[in-house]
Image (cartoon, helix red, strand yellow):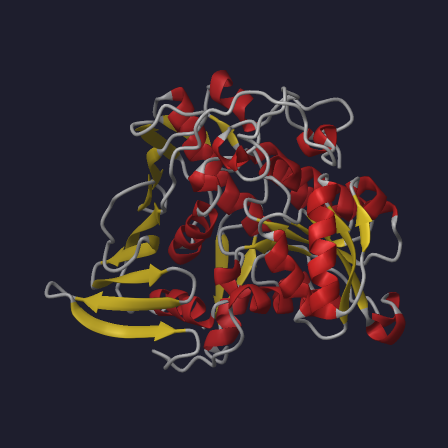
Amino acid sequence: MGRINYNFNNKPILNMDKESSRRSFIKKSAVAGSAALIIPTIVPSSVFGANDRINAAVLGLNGRGKSHIQGFMSQKNVQIKTFCDPDMNILKERQKSFKEKYKADVVLEQDLRRVMDDKDIDVISIASPNHWHALTTIWACQAGKDVYVEKPGSHNISEGRKMVEAAHKYDRIVQHGVQLRSSPAVQEAVQLMRDGYIGNVYMARGLVFRWRPSIGDKGFSPVPEGLDYDLWTGPAPKTPFTENLVHYNWHWNFDYGNGDVGNQGIHETDLCMWGLDVGLPTKITSMGGKFLWDDAKTVPEVLTSVYKYPDENKIIQFEVRPWCTNAEDGATVGNIFYGDKGYLVVDGYDKYQTFLGKDRTPGKSGQDGGPSGSEMDRGAGGTDGHFANFIEAVRKHDASILNGPVETAHLSSGLAHLGNIAYQLDRVLTFNPKSETFVNDKEADAMLTRNYRPGFEVPDQV
């Protein structure tokens, strides 16, 4: 198969080599459609602690942070030294459960800047709210730490590009938390499409049909004891405290989250782009709204976005449905790819099936831990496998082996951001993927970034 090199025009350049294995191709194509990948020099293992141990810190402990703890602790010779969260109540809960499960203690910090100053910390994982992801990644790179950052990598397109610049400038390993990229079955599905199994793949769909009830409107209330609300707010606008934000429903407020397209949906935007082998689009349109509840959400409950690639002659359709709905070919969260010989369905994170021809004849299928639809070896998948890939890249100081490198964090998050901008402006947008700006549209360009609170600015020069 082919080795993929990259230029700064978001275009992969294929150098065909028949000796390359399928698995090698998937590894090397992980950044398809991205900007140039800078390969760091090798750093000797002696930079780590005693016995080659890697010391980690987990930032953000309420939601995905719990999976990050498991992800790190499932790796050989990796130890979590520090938990960091602006809510001391959450910190103490996680410390207690950590002691019980792992028979070890951790340092507790509320201010992530103290973690950056700790020279004993080698790697950090970021599971904080979306509005913190990019700035934390940049600070960590500047502090010489490698990073595993939850999806979406960024809260807006501009800061996503700054993440890429910081990772390259400071020669850091940055993995995006889209664990389906480490699924052997999903890798196999992408390989089948590269091999032409379903023909010319011209369209991808992303499906996010998740049960999302009303969040109500809880109004303002005093800040709970133990929560540093100023630190929780960070780069975002400071508003009176409301339980509609802390700890999960910030997802549904544009100041902090990005709706479900920027929550669950980043897995699916990422796979759409990976499967089609594209970068950012040229034409974007979105429609949606709030049709079910009069609650405190500022994001749409229902969203349909379309992304067109005239040069590549491809298209992406993305849909969010929050309530009673049907599955599509068995998938409620996943992707469907359409080719001129058939179509391929990825259901969730770890399995796929194909249907061929007009009669939809079942073709190859695969699932992690199950029989393979091709010759590909099956390895560890899921969050643990994605962390294993990250730790391997950290030990070797080799970004080329990452399954979810920083470029993909920027691009897959950027696709979601473009859809949200089109929804908010309620019109078709024309975008230049090379300059990462809109064409003659100052109003849309203003939404590529945000106003940051003093002390929490994403820098122009990282």
Horizontally, residue 37 falls left or right of residue 118, namely left
Viewer-nearest residue: 420 or 169: 420
Query: Quick check: can you spot residue 12?
Result: yes
Horizontally, residue 47 falls left or right of residue 282, namely right
Q: Please identify the quarter of the rendering in which residue 424 is found.
A: top left
| Residue farthest toward the top in the current orientation of the protein | 443
Measured from the top left, where is residue 375 in percent x and y?
40, 82
Query: Quick check: can you spot residue 168?
Result: no
- Residue 274 vs 104, above or below: the answer is above
Measured from the top left, where is residue 28 in percent x and y?
54, 66
Horizontally, residue 58 falls left or right of residue 53, namely left
Measured from the top left, where is residue 121 in percent x and y?
83, 56
Viewer-nearest residue: 449 or 322: 322
Q: Quadrant of the N terminus?
A: bottom left
- Residue 150 vs 358, above or below: the answer is above
Q: Residue at x 67, y 29 (%)?
A: 233
Q: Residue at x 78, y 49 (%)?
A: 170
Q: Residue at x 74, y 60 (%)?
A: 40
- Residue 77 vs 237, above or below: the answer is below
Q: Residue at x 87, y 46 (%)?
A: 117
